[in-house]
Amino acid sequence: MSDHANSKSSPLKTYFAVWIALLFGTWLTYRVAQIDLARWHANAPIALIIATTKALLVALFFMHLKGASEKLLKLVVISTIFFLFILMALSMADYATRLWS
Amino acid sequence: MSDSQAAVQPHEGLHNPGLLHHFVTEEQQRDASNLGMWIFLGTEVMFFGGLFCAYLIYRIKYFNDFAAASTSIDAALGGTNTAVLICSSLTVVLAIWAAQTARRKLMLGMLILTMLFGLAFLGIKGMEYKDKFDEHHVPGASFSFEHKEIPSRPGQYANPQHAQIFFALYFIMTGLHALHMVVGLGIFTWLLVMAWKGYFTPHYHTPLEIGGLYWHFVDIIWIYLFPLLYLIDRHR
């Protein structure tokens, strides 16, 4: 509740700034995808970095993770990311070390 | 002391229909709802995570075929849809802000605008699907992806079977996302009715916040789907 009182002064400014940043990120993803960075294998990592930045902006400011006081909530969010990492990492470890026909 | 509290509490409960009897304060009730929603979103992340993992494995294995299949989708439509969803996320936070500051008309307007953006998203999605049906790019008996060049290797054709895996993932992932949008529209219809009836006050608007969390989550999924499905090897 206390963070609510603090951010009440001008949350609108933040919302519109995040909105502009998200639209810019979308435009940037679209443009960067058309530049040939295959030599450095950089197209996919850059696209994912931009997407993750956008996702963080949405989660922190639109979903109000920033300033969330509830510790349990942080635990839920961090363990979600952790279990997603386990899903991806262990699956990829299997496929990377297995002989495919 | 405990006697007097016991005597007071039920009365407070009666005077405040927004506070359920098993919560001590409104803040606790709000936090509990929020936490529950985030746990649900955690399960949703794992739900989509399996699909993203399948996508990752096949994309690494059949990269060139995926690139050929991906470039056959209209990226401009996908990009427009990303912008539409981002705008709808803005209208959601504005609706909640309007509820917090007791601006009834703004709240109703923003909820309606959110739903219009959601419908626009589904409409554009439908146009995209129609293109894919017309081109026989839908996995199944009539699937056809013959003589499609691999973007980075002129003169070399993509394997239709491998391209079909891409389109299967494309339809399942965007389809599941679109289903979430339909559910979101249902939730927002209900929120709009509640808002219209005047249930939401600066004091109590938890359903708006919870519904908003769901909408933003669906937005985040799309933020990842757009570059992964539409923008593989787009450079010429």
Image (cartoon, grey):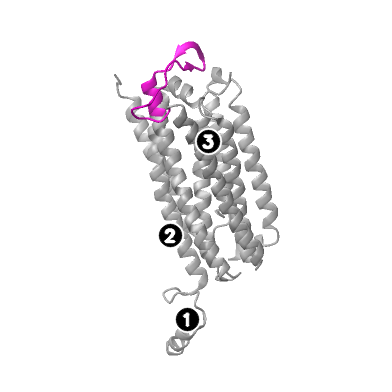
* Chain-order first, disc 3 or disc 2: 2
Q: Is residue A31 above or below residue B80?
A: above
Q: Residues within 10 Å of mark 2 (few under 14, many from 20)?
A: some
* Chain-order first, disc 3 or disc 1: 1
- At a point 54% along the width and 49% down the height, the residue shown is B118
* Chain-order first, disc 1 or disc 2: 1
Indicate the position of residue A57 as horizontal and vertical percent values.
59, 46
Q: Which residue is mark 3?
A: B226
Which residue is situated farthest in the top direction here? B155
Q: Is residue B37 above or below residue A80?
A: below
Location of the N terminus of chain B by quadrant is bottom left
Label 1 is found on which chain of the structure?
A: B
Front one among A94 and B34: B34
> Label 3's element?
helix
Label 2 is found on which chain of the structure?
A: B
**Residues indicated by labels 1 and 2 sit on the same polypeptide chain:** yes
Q: Which residues are magenta?
A: B137-166
- At a point 39% along the width and 32% down the height, the residue shown is B168
Indicate the position of residue B104 as horizontal and vertical percent values.
64, 67
> Label 1's element?
helix
Q: CA distance from mark 1 to mark 2?
A: 23 Å
Q: Which residue is mark 2?
A: B36
Q: Residues within 10 Å of mark 3 (few under 14, many from 20)?
A: many
Q: Is residue B117 left or right of residue B70?
A: right
Q: Which residue is mark 1?
A: B13
Is B150 magenta? The answer is: yes
